[in-house]
Protein backbone atom coordinates (compact mmCIF):
# COMPACT_ATOMS: atom_id res chain seq x y z
CA UNK A 1 0.00 0.00 0.00
CA UNK A 2 1.38 3.46 -0.84
CA UNK A 3 1.06 6.49 1.47
CA UNK A 4 -0.02 8.66 -1.47
CA UNK A 5 -2.87 6.27 -2.34
CA UNK A 6 -4.48 4.97 0.84
CA UNK A 7 -6.27 1.71 0.06
CA UNK A 8 -3.98 0.95 -2.87
CA UNK A 9 -3.13 -2.75 -3.30
CA UNK A 10 -0.43 -4.52 -5.30
CA UNK A 11 -1.69 -5.10 -8.82
CA UNK A 12 -2.44 -8.59 -10.13
CA UNK A 13 -1.28 -9.31 -13.68
CA UNK A 14 -3.04 -11.32 -16.38
CA UNK A 15 -0.89 -12.03 -19.44
CA UNK A 16 -2.36 -12.14 -22.94
CA UNK A 17 0.06 -14.36 -24.92
CA UNK A 18 -0.02 -13.34 -28.58
CA UNK A 19 3.60 -13.62 -29.77
CA UNK A 20 4.93 -10.19 -30.67
CA UNK A 21 1.52 -8.69 -29.84
CA UNK A 22 1.53 -10.05 -26.25
CA UNK A 23 0.65 -7.71 -23.40
CA UNK A 24 -0.25 -7.59 -19.72
CA UNK A 25 -3.45 -6.55 -17.98
CA UNK A 26 -2.60 -4.92 -14.65
CA UNK A 27 -5.49 -5.10 -12.16
CA UNK A 28 -5.23 -3.12 -8.93
CA UNK A 29 -6.95 -0.73 -6.57
CA UNK A 30 -5.43 2.75 -6.70
CA UNK A 31 -2.99 2.08 -9.56
CA UNK A 32 -4.25 4.92 -11.81
CA UNK A 33 -1.71 7.19 -10.13
CA UNK A 34 1.02 4.99 -11.65
CA UNK A 35 -0.15 5.54 -15.23
CA UNK A 36 2.81 7.71 -16.32
CA UNK A 37 5.41 5.22 -15.12
CA UNK A 38 3.33 2.30 -16.47
CA UNK A 39 3.21 3.78 -20.00
CA UNK A 40 6.94 4.56 -20.10
CA UNK A 41 7.83 1.15 -18.69
CA UNK A 42 6.13 -0.49 -21.68
CA UNK A 43 7.10 1.75 -24.63
CA UNK A 44 9.20 4.75 -25.60
CA UNK A 45 6.45 7.37 -25.69
CA UNK A 46 6.88 11.05 -26.60
CA UNK A 47 3.32 12.09 -27.51
CA UNK A 48 0.03 10.74 -26.14
CA UNK A 49 -3.40 11.33 -27.66
CA UNK A 50 -5.63 10.83 -24.61
CA UNK A 51 -9.25 10.10 -25.57
CA UNK A 52 -12.08 10.20 -23.05
CA UNK A 53 -15.74 11.15 -22.68
CA UNK A 54 -17.21 13.96 -20.57
CA UNK A 55 -18.38 11.78 -17.65
CA UNK A 56 -14.99 10.13 -17.25
CA UNK A 57 -12.90 13.22 -18.03
CA UNK A 58 -14.64 15.08 -15.19
CA UNK A 59 -13.04 12.74 -12.63
CA UNK A 60 -9.95 11.24 -14.18
CA UNK A 61 -8.59 13.23 -17.16
CA UNK A 62 -6.54 15.73 -15.15
CA UNK A 63 -4.76 13.20 -12.89
CA UNK A 64 -3.99 10.95 -15.87
CA UNK A 65 -2.78 13.90 -17.97
CA UNK A 66 -0.58 15.12 -15.10
CA UNK A 67 0.90 11.66 -14.44
CA UNK A 68 1.77 11.22 -18.13
CA UNK A 69 3.11 14.77 -18.53
CA UNK A 70 5.30 14.22 -15.44
CA UNK A 71 7.24 11.68 -17.52
CA UNK A 72 8.09 14.43 -20.06
CA UNK A 73 5.45 13.27 -22.56
CA UNK A 74 3.40 15.77 -24.59
CA UNK A 75 -0.35 15.13 -24.14
CA UNK A 76 -3.20 15.98 -26.52
CA UNK A 77 -6.50 15.46 -24.69
CA UNK A 78 -9.55 14.87 -26.88
CA UNK A 79 -13.14 14.44 -25.73
CA UNK A 80 -16.23 12.80 -27.23
CA UNK A 81 -19.84 12.88 -26.01
CA UNK A 82 -20.63 10.00 -23.64
CA UNK A 83 -22.76 7.15 -25.02
CA UNK A 84 -23.09 4.58 -27.78
CA UNK A 85 -23.92 7.23 -30.41
CA UNK A 86 -20.24 8.25 -30.34
CA UNK A 87 -19.17 4.93 -31.90
CA UNK A 88 -19.80 6.53 -35.29
CA UNK A 89 -18.08 7.67 -38.47
CA UNK A 90 -18.59 11.41 -37.69
CA UNK A 91 -17.04 11.06 -34.21
CA UNK A 92 -14.12 9.01 -35.56
CA UNK A 93 -13.57 11.69 -38.22
CA UNK A 94 -13.59 14.46 -35.59
CA UNK A 95 -10.89 12.56 -33.66
CA UNK A 96 -8.74 11.94 -36.76
CA UNK A 97 -8.89 15.65 -37.60
CA UNK A 98 -8.27 16.89 -34.06
CA UNK A 99 -5.29 14.54 -33.64
CA UNK A 100 -3.83 15.74 -36.94
CA UNK A 101 -4.37 19.38 -35.96
CA UNK A 102 -2.20 18.74 -32.89
CA UNK A 103 0.66 17.16 -34.88
CA UNK A 104 -0.01 13.46 -34.47
CA UNK A 105 2.66 11.37 -36.18
CA UNK A 106 3.59 7.69 -36.43
CA UNK A 107 5.39 7.83 -33.07
CA UNK A 108 2.28 9.09 -31.25
CA UNK A 109 0.43 6.76 -28.87
CA UNK A 110 -3.33 6.64 -28.29
CA UNK A 111 -4.58 6.14 -24.73
CA UNK A 112 -8.26 5.26 -24.23
CA UNK A 113 -9.55 6.44 -20.84
CA UNK A 114 -13.18 5.38 -20.44
CA UNK A 115 -15.77 2.67 -20.94
CA UNK A 116 -16.22 0.34 -23.87
CA UNK A 117 -17.44 3.11 -26.16
CA UNK A 118 -14.26 5.13 -25.72
CA UNK A 119 -12.11 1.97 -25.89
CA UNK A 120 -13.67 0.69 -29.14
CA UNK A 121 -13.64 4.16 -30.75
CA UNK A 122 -10.15 5.21 -29.62
CA UNK A 123 -8.81 1.80 -30.62
CA UNK A 124 -10.35 2.22 -34.06
CA UNK A 125 -8.75 5.67 -34.39
CA UNK A 126 -5.41 4.15 -33.29
CA UNK A 127 -5.72 1.32 -35.83
CA UNK A 128 -6.45 3.68 -38.71
CA UNK A 129 -4.58 6.95 -38.02
CA UNK A 130 -1.38 7.01 -40.14
CA UNK A 131 -2.17 3.27 -40.71
CA UNK A 132 -1.65 2.31 -37.09
CA UNK A 133 -0.56 3.88 -33.80
CA UNK A 134 0.42 2.25 -30.51
CA UNK A 135 -2.56 2.00 -28.21
CA UNK A 136 -3.14 1.60 -24.46
CA UNK A 137 -6.40 0.87 -22.67
CA UNK A 138 -7.38 2.37 -19.29
CA UNK A 139 -10.92 0.96 -18.89
CA UNK A 140 -13.08 2.78 -16.34
CA UNK A 141 -16.46 0.98 -16.54
CA UNK A 142 -16.95 -2.55 -15.18
CA UNK A 143 -17.92 -3.74 -18.65
CA UNK A 144 -14.70 -2.39 -20.13
CA UNK A 145 -12.62 -3.87 -17.28
CA UNK A 146 -14.07 -7.38 -17.66
CA UNK A 147 -14.40 -7.53 -21.43
CA UNK A 148 -14.00 -4.73 -23.97
CA UNK A 149 -10.47 -3.53 -23.10
CA UNK A 150 -9.04 -7.02 -23.69
CA UNK A 151 -8.68 -8.82 -27.01
CA UNK A 152 -8.23 -6.08 -29.58
CA UNK A 153 -11.69 -5.84 -31.17
CA UNK A 154 -12.03 -2.13 -31.99
CA UNK A 155 -14.64 -0.45 -34.12
CA UNK A 156 -17.66 1.70 -34.68
CA UNK A 157 -21.33 1.20 -35.62
CA UNK A 158 -23.29 2.08 -38.74
CA UNK A 159 -26.95 3.02 -38.18
CA UNK A 160 -27.87 -0.37 -39.68
CA UNK A 161 -25.31 -2.63 -37.97
CA UNK A 162 -23.43 -2.72 -34.69
CA UNK A 163 -19.58 -2.87 -34.69
CA UNK A 164 -19.65 -3.48 -38.43
CA UNK A 165 -16.63 -1.28 -39.27
CA UNK A 166 -13.49 -2.05 -37.32
CA UNK A 167 -10.25 -3.94 -36.89
CA UNK A 168 -8.35 -6.32 -34.66
CA UNK A 169 -5.84 -3.98 -33.03
CA UNK A 170 -4.32 -5.16 -29.78
CA UNK A 171 -3.41 -2.70 -27.04
CA UNK A 172 0.18 -2.63 -25.78
CA UNK A 173 -1.14 -2.82 -22.23
CA UNK A 174 -4.31 -2.57 -20.14
CA UNK A 175 -4.36 -0.74 -16.80
CA UNK A 176 -7.35 -1.52 -14.59
CA UNK A 177 -7.96 0.51 -11.43
CA UNK A 178 -10.99 -0.89 -9.57
CA UNK A 179 -11.15 2.30 -7.45
CA UNK A 180 -12.63 4.21 -10.41
CA UNK A 181 -15.75 2.03 -10.23
CA UNK A 182 -16.86 4.09 -7.21
CA UNK A 183 -18.04 6.86 -9.55
CA UNK A 184 -19.69 4.54 -12.11
CA UNK A 185 -23.51 5.00 -12.15
CA UNK A 186 -25.43 1.98 -10.84
CA UNK A 187 -27.18 1.13 -14.11
CA UNK A 188 -23.83 1.11 -15.95
CA UNK A 189 -22.28 -1.03 -13.23
CA UNK A 190 -25.07 -3.62 -13.45
CA UNK A 191 -24.71 -3.67 -17.24
CA UNK A 192 -21.09 -4.82 -16.81
CA UNK A 193 -22.21 -7.74 -14.63
CA UNK A 194 -24.05 -9.25 -17.62
CA UNK A 195 -20.74 -9.85 -19.43
CA UNK A 196 -19.32 -11.38 -16.21
CA UNK A 197 -22.22 -13.85 -16.11
CA UNK A 198 -21.54 -14.58 -19.79
CA UNK A 199 -18.04 -15.82 -18.87
CA UNK A 200 -19.53 -18.24 -16.34
CA UNK A 201 -22.03 -19.65 -18.82
CA UNK A 202 -19.61 -20.05 -21.72
CA UNK A 203 -16.55 -21.43 -19.92
CA UNK A 204 -16.68 -21.89 -16.18
CA UNK A 205 -19.55 -23.50 -14.25
CA UNK A 206 -17.72 -23.01 -10.91
CA UNK A 207 -17.40 -19.30 -11.61
CA UNK A 208 -21.13 -19.16 -12.42
CA UNK A 209 -21.89 -20.82 -9.05
CA UNK A 210 -19.57 -18.31 -7.34
CA UNK A 211 -21.60 -15.48 -8.90
CA UNK A 212 -24.85 -17.05 -7.70
CA UNK A 213 -23.41 -17.20 -4.19
CA UNK A 214 -22.20 -13.57 -4.22
CA UNK A 215 -25.14 -11.51 -5.45
CA UNK A 216 -25.20 -9.11 -2.50
CA UNK A 217 -21.42 -8.48 -2.42
CA UNK A 218 -21.58 -7.83 -6.18
CA UNK A 219 -24.44 -5.35 -5.72
CA UNK A 220 -22.40 -3.69 -2.95
CA UNK A 221 -19.30 -3.50 -5.19
CA UNK A 222 -17.31 -5.41 -2.57
CA UNK A 223 -13.62 -4.77 -3.44
CA UNK A 224 -12.49 -8.40 -2.98
CA UNK A 225 -15.35 -9.74 -5.10
CA UNK A 226 -14.68 -7.08 -7.76
CA UNK A 227 -11.02 -8.06 -7.93
CA UNK A 228 -12.02 -11.73 -8.33
CA UNK A 229 -14.67 -11.24 -11.02
CA UNK A 230 -12.52 -8.85 -13.05
CA UNK A 231 -9.44 -11.07 -12.86
CA UNK A 232 -11.36 -14.28 -13.71
CA UNK A 233 -13.19 -12.67 -16.65
CA UNK A 234 -9.88 -11.29 -17.99
CA UNK A 235 -8.17 -14.69 -17.57
CA UNK A 236 -10.92 -16.50 -19.45
CA UNK A 237 -11.00 -13.90 -22.23
CA UNK A 238 -7.18 -13.93 -22.51
CA UNK A 239 -7.18 -17.73 -22.93
CA UNK A 240 -9.75 -17.61 -25.73
CA UNK A 241 -8.12 -14.68 -27.53
CA UNK A 242 -4.69 -16.33 -27.30
CA UNK A 243 -6.05 -19.38 -29.14
CA UNK A 244 -8.13 -17.58 -31.78
CA UNK A 245 -7.18 -13.92 -31.94
CA UNK A 246 -9.16 -13.01 -35.05
CA UNK A 247 -12.15 -15.35 -34.66
CA UNK A 248 -11.04 -17.60 -37.49
CA UNK A 249 -11.25 -21.07 -35.95
CA UNK A 250 -14.61 -20.35 -34.34
CA UNK A 251 -13.35 -20.56 -30.75
CA UNK A 252 -13.41 -16.80 -30.16
CA UNK A 253 -16.99 -16.71 -31.40
CA UNK A 254 -18.08 -18.20 -28.04
CA UNK A 255 -17.46 -14.75 -26.54
CA UNK A 256 -20.41 -13.72 -28.70
CA UNK A 257 -22.88 -15.79 -26.63
CA UNK A 258 -26.22 -13.91 -26.65
CA UNK A 259 -24.80 -11.23 -28.94
CA UNK A 260 -26.69 -12.04 -32.18
CA UNK A 261 -29.94 -11.18 -30.40
CA UNK A 262 -28.21 -8.46 -28.33
CA UNK A 263 -26.79 -6.55 -31.29
CA UNK A 264 -30.10 -6.81 -33.19
CA UNK A 265 -31.88 -5.40 -30.12
CA UNK A 266 -29.38 -2.53 -29.74
CA UNK A 267 -29.59 -1.66 -33.44
CA UNK A 268 -33.36 -1.89 -33.86
CA UNK A 269 -34.16 -0.04 -30.62
CA UNK A 270 -31.77 2.78 -31.58
CA UNK A 271 -28.27 2.75 -30.06
CA UNK A 272 -28.44 3.73 -26.42
CA UNK A 273 -31.95 2.73 -25.35
CA UNK A 274 -30.61 -0.58 -24.05
CA UNK A 275 -27.12 -0.50 -22.54
CA UNK A 276 -24.90 -3.17 -24.09
CA UNK A 277 -24.93 -5.39 -20.98
CA UNK A 278 -28.70 -5.08 -20.69
CA UNK A 279 -29.06 -6.27 -24.27
CA UNK A 280 -26.58 -9.10 -23.53
CA UNK A 281 -28.84 -10.15 -20.64
CA UNK A 282 -31.91 -10.36 -22.89
CA UNK A 283 -29.84 -11.99 -25.67
CA UNK A 284 -28.37 -14.74 -23.46
CA UNK A 285 -31.88 -15.83 -22.47
CA UNK A 286 -32.97 -15.86 -26.12
CA UNK A 287 -29.94 -18.05 -26.94
CA UNK A 288 -30.82 -20.32 -24.01
CA UNK A 289 -34.39 -20.78 -25.24
CA UNK A 290 -32.92 -21.50 -28.67
CA UNK A 291 -30.81 -24.22 -27.02
CA UNK A 292 -33.98 -25.70 -25.51
CA UNK A 293 -35.69 -25.71 -28.91
CA UNK A 294 -32.69 -27.46 -30.45
CA UNK A 295 -32.93 -30.07 -27.68
CA UNK A 296 -29.42 -29.43 -26.31
CA UNK A 297 -30.15 -27.28 -23.23
CA UNK A 298 -32.54 -27.69 -20.31
CA UNK A 299 -35.15 -25.21 -19.12
CA UNK A 300 -33.78 -25.39 -15.56
CA UNK A 301 -30.44 -23.94 -16.70
CA UNK A 302 -32.24 -21.16 -18.57
CA UNK A 303 -34.08 -20.40 -15.32
CA UNK A 304 -30.82 -20.37 -13.33
CA UNK A 305 -29.49 -17.65 -15.63
CA UNK A 306 -32.74 -15.68 -15.52
CA UNK A 307 -32.75 -15.83 -11.71
CA UNK A 308 -29.17 -14.56 -11.44
CA UNK A 309 -29.70 -11.83 -14.05
CA UNK A 310 -32.89 -10.65 -12.31
CA UNK A 311 -31.21 -10.68 -8.89
CA UNK A 312 -28.61 -8.35 -10.42
CA UNK A 313 -31.45 -6.11 -11.66
CA UNK A 314 -30.81 -6.86 -15.33
CA UNK A 315 -33.66 -7.08 -17.85
CA UNK A 316 -34.82 -10.58 -18.75
CA UNK A 317 -37.88 -9.91 -20.91
CA UNK A 318 -37.74 -9.47 -24.67
CA UNK A 319 -39.20 -6.11 -25.76
CA UNK A 320 -41.91 -5.94 -28.42
CA UNK A 321 -40.12 -4.89 -31.61
CA UNK A 322 -40.72 -5.65 -35.29
CA UNK A 323 -39.64 -9.26 -35.94
CA UNK A 324 -38.84 -8.33 -39.53
CA UNK A 325 -36.44 -5.65 -38.30
CA UNK A 326 -34.86 -8.01 -35.73
CA UNK A 327 -34.35 -10.74 -38.33
CA UNK A 328 -32.89 -8.34 -40.84
CA UNK A 329 -30.46 -6.99 -38.16
CA UNK A 330 -29.49 -10.58 -37.21
CA UNK A 331 -28.73 -11.27 -40.87
CA UNK A 332 -26.06 -8.53 -40.70
CA UNK A 333 -24.31 -10.26 -37.76
CA UNK A 334 -20.61 -10.88 -38.43
CA UNK A 335 -20.98 -14.61 -37.69
CA UNK A 336 -23.26 -15.03 -40.71
CA UNK A 337 -21.57 -17.24 -43.34
CA UNK A 338 -22.85 -17.67 -46.91
CA UNK A 339 -26.06 -15.96 -45.84
CA UNK A 340 -26.71 -18.45 -42.97
CA UNK A 341 -27.21 -17.46 -39.33
CA UNK A 342 -24.87 -19.05 -36.77
CA UNK A 343 -25.57 -18.85 -33.04
CA UNK A 344 -23.62 -19.57 -29.86
CA UNK A 345 -25.88 -22.13 -28.22
CA UNK A 346 -25.46 -23.29 -24.60
CA UNK A 347 -25.33 -27.05 -23.95
CA UNK A 348 -24.72 -26.73 -20.19
CA UNK A 349 -23.70 -24.00 -17.78
CA UNK A 350 -19.99 -23.79 -18.64
CA UNK A 351 -20.26 -25.09 -22.22
CA UNK A 352 -21.47 -23.40 -25.42
CA UNK A 353 -21.20 -24.45 -29.06
CA UNK A 354 -21.05 -22.41 -32.29
CA UNK A 355 -24.09 -23.77 -34.15
CA UNK A 356 -24.66 -23.29 -37.90
CA UNK A 357 -27.85 -23.77 -39.89
CA UNK A 358 -30.27 -22.51 -37.27
CA UNK A 359 -33.61 -21.87 -39.01
CA UNK A 360 -34.57 -18.19 -38.77
CA UNK A 361 -38.09 -19.10 -37.64
CA UNK A 362 -36.66 -21.03 -34.67
CA UNK A 363 -34.48 -18.07 -33.69
CA UNK A 364 -37.45 -15.72 -33.93
CA UNK A 365 -39.55 -18.08 -31.80
CA UNK A 366 -36.81 -18.01 -29.11
CA UNK A 367 -36.94 -14.21 -29.28
CA UNK A 368 -40.77 -14.04 -29.21
CA UNK A 369 -41.19 -16.41 -26.27
CA UNK A 370 -39.29 -13.96 -24.06
CA UNK A 371 -41.96 -11.29 -24.46
CA UNK A 372 -43.86 -10.95 -21.19
CA UNK A 373 -47.54 -11.67 -21.49
CA UNK A 374 -49.16 -8.34 -20.73
CA UNK A 375 -52.38 -10.04 -19.70
CA UNK A 376 -50.60 -12.28 -17.15
N1 LIG B 1 -14.34 -4.59 -27.99
C1 LIG B 1 -14.93 -5.54 -27.29
O1 LIG B 1 -14.44 -6.67 -27.16
C2 LIG B 1 -16.21 -5.22 -26.59
C3 LIG B 1 -16.70 -6.09 -25.60
C4 LIG B 1 -17.88 -5.75 -24.94
C5 LIG B 1 -18.52 -4.55 -25.23
N2 LIG B 1 -18.00 -3.72 -26.17
C6 LIG B 1 -18.63 -2.43 -26.44
O2 LIG B 1 -18.52 -1.62 -25.27
C7 LIG B 1 -19.55 -0.64 -25.28
C8 LIG B 1 -20.22 -0.56 -23.93
O3 LIG B 1 -19.24 -0.19 -22.98
P1 LIG B 1 -19.67 0.44 -21.57
O4 LIG B 1 -20.73 -0.34 -20.98
O5 LIG B 1 -18.41 0.67 -20.83
O6 LIG B 1 -20.34 1.81 -22.00
P2 LIG B 1 -19.77 3.30 -22.03
O7 LIG B 1 -18.44 3.37 -22.61
O8 LIG B 1 -20.86 4.11 -22.63
O9 LIG B 1 -19.62 3.65 -20.49
C9 LIG B 1 -20.75 3.62 -19.67
C10 LIG B 1 -21.11 5.01 -19.10
O10 LIG B 1 -20.42 5.19 -17.87
C11 LIG B 1 -19.59 6.34 -17.91
N3 LIG B 1 -18.40 5.97 -17.17
C12 LIG B 1 -17.46 5.06 -17.52
N4 LIG B 1 -16.58 4.90 -16.52
C13 LIG B 1 -16.98 5.71 -15.52
C14 LIG B 1 -16.50 5.95 -14.21
N5 LIG B 1 -15.47 5.28 -13.70
N6 LIG B 1 -17.13 6.88 -13.47
C15 LIG B 1 -18.21 7.55 -13.95
N7 LIG B 1 -18.74 7.34 -15.16
C16 LIG B 1 -18.13 6.42 -15.94
C17 LIG B 1 -19.40 6.65 -19.37
O11 LIG B 1 -19.14 8.02 -19.56
C18 LIG B 1 -20.74 6.23 -19.95
O12 LIG B 1 -21.69 7.24 -19.75
C19 LIG B 1 -20.52 -1.05 -26.37
O13 LIG B 1 -20.34 -0.23 -27.48
C20 LIG B 1 -20.10 -2.47 -26.70
O14 LIG B 1 -20.41 -2.81 -28.02
C21 LIG B 1 -16.87 -4.04 -26.85
O1 LIG C 1 -14.25 -10.05 -27.78
C1 LIG C 1 -15.09 -10.70 -28.41
O2 LIG C 1 -14.77 -11.47 -29.33
C2 LIG C 1 -16.52 -10.58 -28.06
O3 LIG C 1 -17.37 -11.12 -28.77
C3 LIG C 1 -16.88 -9.82 -26.83
C4 LIG C 1 -18.27 -9.21 -26.87
O4 LIG C 1 -18.68 -9.05 -25.52
C5 LIG C 1 -18.30 -7.81 -27.49
O5 LIG C 1 -19.59 -7.25 -27.34
C6 LIG C 1 -17.81 -7.69 -28.91
O6 LIG C 1 -17.68 -6.32 -29.27
C7 LIG C 1 -18.74 -8.29 -29.93
O7 LIG C 1 -18.02 -8.52 -31.09
P1 LIG C 1 -18.64 -8.50 -32.54
O8 LIG C 1 -17.55 -9.08 -33.36
O9 LIG C 1 -19.89 -9.33 -32.52
O10 LIG C 1 -18.93 -7.09 -32.88
ZN1 LIG D 1 -20.47 -7.82 -25.39
Image: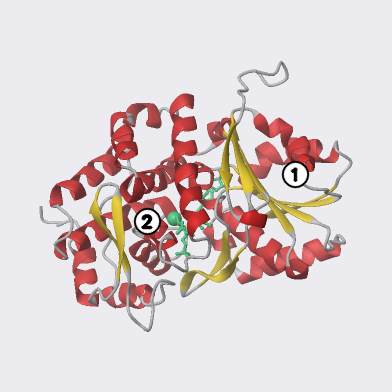
Task: Report x, y in % for residue 360.
Answer: 24, 76
Query: In the image, what residue occupies the spot 63% across and 22% down?
Result: 8
Q: Residues within 10 Å of mark 2 (few under 14, many from 20)?
A: many
Above or below, comparing residue 140 to residue 29 in the picture: below
Q: Is residue 239 left or right of residue 122?
A: left
Task: Report x, y in % for residue 100.
Answer: 82, 65
Q: Residue furthest left?
A: 376
Query: In the image, what residue occupies the spot 68% across and 43% down?
Result: 57
Task: Report x, y in % for residue 376.
Answer: 10, 52
| The quarter of the picture showing ligand 3 | bottom left
Is the residue at mark 2 in contact range of ligand 3, meaning its CB lies under 8 Å from it?
no
Which disc number belongs to residue 42?
1
Above or below, comparing residue 314 to residue 209 in the picture: below
The local secondary structure at tag 2 comes to: helix
Q: Nearer the viewer, residue 125 or 220?
A: 125
Is residue 275 at all visible to an observer of this figure?
no
Above or below, comparing residue 39 to residue 366 in the picture: above
Is the residue at mark 1 in contact range of ligand 1, meaning its CB lies under 8 Å from it?
no
Quadrant assignment for the N terminus: top right
Label 1 or label 2, whichever lies nearer to me, is 1
Which disc number belongs to residue 119?
none
Quadrant for residue 122, please give it. bottom right
The local secondary structure at tag 1 comes to: helix
Task: Report x, y in % for residue 163.
Answer: 51, 67
Above or below, comparing residue 2 to residue 38 in the picture: above
Q: Is residue 188 left or right of residue 174?
A: left
Query: Which residue position is annotated with label 2?
Result: 279
Q: Residues within 10 Å of mark 1 (few under 14, many from 20)?
A: few
Q: Nearer the viewer, residue 322 or 141?
A: 141
Amino acid sequence: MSAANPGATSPQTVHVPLGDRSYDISIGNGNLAEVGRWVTSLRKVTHVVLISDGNVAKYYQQPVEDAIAAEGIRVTSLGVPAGEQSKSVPTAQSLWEAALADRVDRKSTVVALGGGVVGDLAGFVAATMTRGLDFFQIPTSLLAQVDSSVGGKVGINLPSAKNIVGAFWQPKGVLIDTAVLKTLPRREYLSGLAEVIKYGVILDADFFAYLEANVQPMLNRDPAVLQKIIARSCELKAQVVAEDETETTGLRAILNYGHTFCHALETVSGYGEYLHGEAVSVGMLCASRLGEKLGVFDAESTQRQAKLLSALELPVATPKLSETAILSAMQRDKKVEHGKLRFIVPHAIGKVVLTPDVPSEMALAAWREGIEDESA
